[in-house]
Image (cartoon, coloured by chain):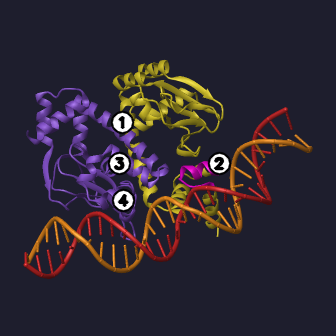
Chain colours: A yellow, B purple, C orange, D red
Amino acid sequence: MSNFEVFFDYIQEISGKLLSEDDKQLLMAHFKSKKLRKRQYFLQEGDVCKYIGFIVKGSARTFTVDEKGHENVLKLSVENWWLADFESFYLLTPSRFNIEALEDLEVLQSTNAQIEEFLKHIPAFSAMQNIISQNYTIANQKRVQAAFSYTAEERYEDLVSNYPHFLKRFPQNMIASYLGLSPETLSRIRKNSFK
Amino acid sequence: MSNFEVFFDYIQEISGKLLSEDDKQLLMAHFKSKKLRKRQYFLQEGDVCKYIGFIVKGSARTFTVDEKGHENVLKLSVENWWLADFESFYLLTPSRFNIEALEDLEVLQSTNAQIEEFLKHIPAFSAMQNIISQNYTIANQKRVQAAFSYTAEERYEDLVSNYPHFLKRFPQNMIASYLGLSPETLSRIRKNSFK
DNA sequence: CGATTAACTTGATCCAGGTCAGGACAATGA
DNA sequence: TCATTGTCCTGACCTGGATCAAGTTAATCG
């Protein structure tokens, strides 16, 4: 299945609506395929996030770096997820985040201005957008709650049950950072959970 | 200015579009005014969040209660904000949250099904929804980052500079809980920040 | 292949922030 | 009015998880 076929299926499935031939032509005309090698950056801190990318293959992490050089992973993204710093993308302000490929990455990307067009002209696309932003809101709400009221163990258990494939796919120090933990602490938690 | 005038102004301002007379009639027909006294609940854990409310007057908090009876404030809401557990409201699942009036509260409320109608028929309403969901996405992104990578002091300073009016309006223990802190810790932080 | 470099583990120590306890002022209410 | 209840402060102590350090295993690459 080609990249665009995967993409079209995704849109139709999420939105519950069909794409017309015209819709597809429009999307194909304005989403560009982009490939990044592992460790390459999709977005660098300080730059405006001009593109939003739909991940066809591979994975990435969104992270910040604090004054001490400490990296902080906010998001791990895999196939069929969208890649962007939405704040920067929507407002066209310089980003505070970095987005880096963790595996060789292939995305279909487009700009803010073009997304506006899709929203106007493609009903399935705007239906998709509504549902995605709902999902994001829900996911972020959970994440904030987890950060404030769950212990390290609980956050890890949560990840194990909700995203077990992440454990196989990402190095443990990325997972630790995503959970807001030091690698040492995660290592100890895992050790305990085997007993 | 009547409640609906406030509401209409808000929609027009946020969306950048005007409401027609028909639009207004439709909104007035399906948004119902609801008043709650201080300490009354807009939503109780376990119930489905059937209504979304637009706050005309007053304030509220969204919080969870853990096994130990410890309350955890996730959101503080004031005039011109929307009140709902979006997860429950969109998915019609039982809510994990409580929403309680912190001051006497007046909202204009409507149901999920009616919101769908507004989105379909009122362009300003759907434009508003897009912008609000962008803002939510951005705000949530920031809150996740703050939760994971800021210290207690930093989170407090952030609140002081972004929502100074919250400090005057809400009791300190609510603020503490919102910041993910014990009241004692917040009290000490405030003491230190005066020197 | 052997040599670097990255990923993971384990132990020892430290500290931000939580918990517990007590007291001082409001504010609310019979 | 005084009593109750809520809010805020302060001190003493405790603990989950960070940090530092050092060793082991696993990838990567010339």
CA–CA distance between discs 4 and 1?
A: 36 Å
CA–CA distance between discs 2 and 1?
A: 31 Å
Asked if badge 3 and badge 1 are on a common chain, one would say yes
Q: Which residues are magenta?
A: A168-183
Mark in the foreground, 3 or 1: 3
Q: What's under tag 3, amino acid-wise?
A: Leu
Q: Which mark is residue B134?
A: 1
Circle 3 residue: B159
Circle 4 residue: B191
Mark in the foreground, 4 or 3: 4
For marks 3 and 1, the one nearer the N-term is 1
Answer whether labels 4 and 2 touch (C-beta < 8 Å). Answer: no
Circle 2 residue: A171
Q: Position of residue B32 (x, y in %)?
A: 13, 47
Q: What's under tag 4, amino acid-wise?
A: Lys
CA–CA distance between discs 4 and 2?
A: 42 Å
Query: Which residue does the image show at 32% across and 58% down from the upper left?
Result: B63
- Badge 1 density bin: few <14, some 14–19, many ≥20, Cα 10 Å: some
